[in-house]
Amino acid sequence: MYTLYGIKNCDSVKKARQWLDKHKVEYQFHDFRVHGLTPEQLQIFIERAGWESVLNKRSTSWRQVDEGQKADLNAEKAAVLMLANLTLIKRPVLVAGEQLFIGFNAENYQTLL
């Protein structure tokens, strides 16, 4: 079974859930706001995709981050920021065995079928 991480009311997460449901792909939904996220879970995302892919620099949450915190970012600093504000994580994150998909892309999801 796969795990889809995100926030229930996020449009990209809604699209991913609709796609998975339509194609009858079994998954468990993990809502960051309800279930939180452990440092270990975030570390898996970072190891598989790189912190630059996991950190959503286009989000409104990112624009609210202090400039000092944005300076000299590395994997460790980015992880601390993302754990402190889970909406900084690009959504959705789909863990499918050894595969990890960041953001929703129907073509990428097609490989699950």
Image (cartoon, rainbow, N blue to C red):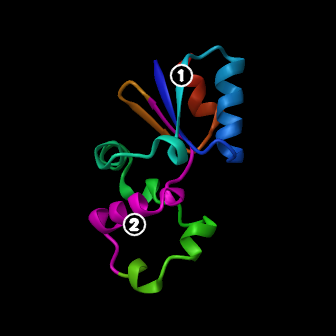
Residue type (three-letter) at the residue carrying disc 2: Leu
**Label 2, on which residue?**
81
Going by the picture, which residue comes out furthest to the front? 34
Question: What number of labels is visible?
Answer: 2
Q: Are marks 2 and 1 in contact (CB under 8 Å)?
A: no
Q: Position of residue 84 (x, y in %)?
A: 41, 63
Q: Quadrant of residue 73?
A: bottom left
At a point 56% along the width and 47% down the height, the residue shown is 91
Q: Position of residue 61 (x, y in %)?
A: 57, 68
Q: Is residue 102 visible from the viewing direction of this image? A: no
Against 30, is 87 above or below? below
Against 38, is 88 above or below? below
**Label 1, on which residue?**
27
Image mark for residue 66 = none
At a point 60% along the width and 65% down the height, the residue shown is 58
- Mark 1 is surrounded, within 10 Å at the Cα level, by few (under 14), some (14 to 19) or many (20 or more) other residues, namely some
| First of labels 2, 1 by sequence position | 1
Q: Position of residue 74 (x, y in %)?
A: 30, 68
- Secondary structure under tag 1 reads strand
At a point 45% along the width and 54% down the height, the residue shown is 53
Q: Quadrant of residue 95?
A: top left
Mark 2 to mark 1: distance in Å? Answer: 27 Å
Which quadrant is home to the C terminus? top right
Q: Which residues are magenta?
A: 72-95
Q: Position of residue 34 (x, y in %)?
A: 53, 43
- Secondary structure under tag 2 reads helix
